[in-house]
Amino acid sequence: MHGYLGIDVGSVSTNIVVIDDHNEVKHKLYIRTQGQPIKAVQKGLQKVKEEIGEDLTIMGVGTTGSARNLTALMVGADVVKNEITAHAVAASTLVPDAKTVIEIGGQDSKIIIIRNGVVADFAMNTVCAAGTGSFLDQQASRLELPIEEFGRMALHSNNPVRIAGRCSVFAESDMIHKQQMGHSLEDIVAGLCEALVRNYLNNVGKGKNIQSKIVFQGGVAANHGMIEAFKRELKCEVVVPEYHDVMGAIGSALLAKETTKGQSTKFKGFKSAMAQYQASSFECNSCANSCEVIQILEGEEVLARWGDRCGKWENGSMKREQIS
């Protein structure tokens, strides 16, 4: 059987999926990156190899996420795309009439406007992490609630309180104040979900032409309180795909399938999971720019360098266009 590998490496999670020739997800993996993308990718590849067995042949690999270029070097990717493209491709394929994609991940959030199957507009959050998965994890931990129950608790609220959700610091302070005033936990959690949805729509979604069908994806789409808050605010159906937490990886796998059609893959094989990779950096003193150059080594061999403005180091190891 043939399979296509998609790898999405972000700051919070590393997601890996395998799809077949019919775009069906045959395997998915969600693990924490923990600030070590190389180890996370190798751990993920090892698990995938153990679970898919010898019957499946990888015919193409795609990477996305903030560590997409690094991951592409490690595994030998056939296609490397940014998160906007990967999420849009996955949403358009799994929900064919999707017109708006709301994606909220561990540390960022984005909105993608799709018209006639192509990305017409998009935006990402800027500096504030309010409303992202990390902030919700932090608040669930502070309230000593399992994150799985956090959203369901909001559904039992009769009178959500008003929380200032424009900033994570203000939101937490306001939640503590409401607790001290004696409001129920259900009303506070529901109020937080409503505040984060307002914050998202007023910042990330500001000025965007949001039309149905709306697809909600990313790890935060597992939060039932956030789903209901979006439905109330947008007054329309919000679709949460079955594999909402790994849509970036699915998009990468779909792009890999399209890229390798009729061609051989560059995939190095699952031996990448055992290779010795090292990432280091140094400051170039050749000019006044003093660029911080990042280099990736496999054993003693330099696989790639990037970060220099003039291309002196980058062009010396591999061409940039191959990994961007």
Image (cartoon, rainbow, N blue to C red):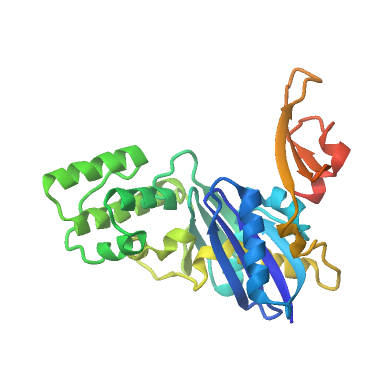
Q: Residue 151, image x and y in percent?
A: 32, 62
103 displayed left or right of 117:
left
315 displayed left or right of 169:
right
Considering every residue shown, the one lying at the far top of the view is 288
49 displayed left or right of 15:
right
Q: Residue 21, image x and y in percent?
A: 71, 79
Depth order, front residue of 136/34? 34
Residue drawn where x is 51% and y is 61% of the image = 101
Depth order, front residue of 219/121? 219
Please identify the quarter of the rendering in which residue 194 is found: bottom left
* Camera sees residue 212: yes
Depth order, front residue of 199/32? 32
Q: Residue 95, image x and y in percent?
A: 55, 73
* Camera sees residue 167: no
Residue drawn where x is 81% and y is 50% of the image = 322
Please identify the quarter of the rendering in which residue 3 is found: bottom right
54 displayed left or right of 221:
right
Residue drawn where x is 78% and y is 20% of the image = 285
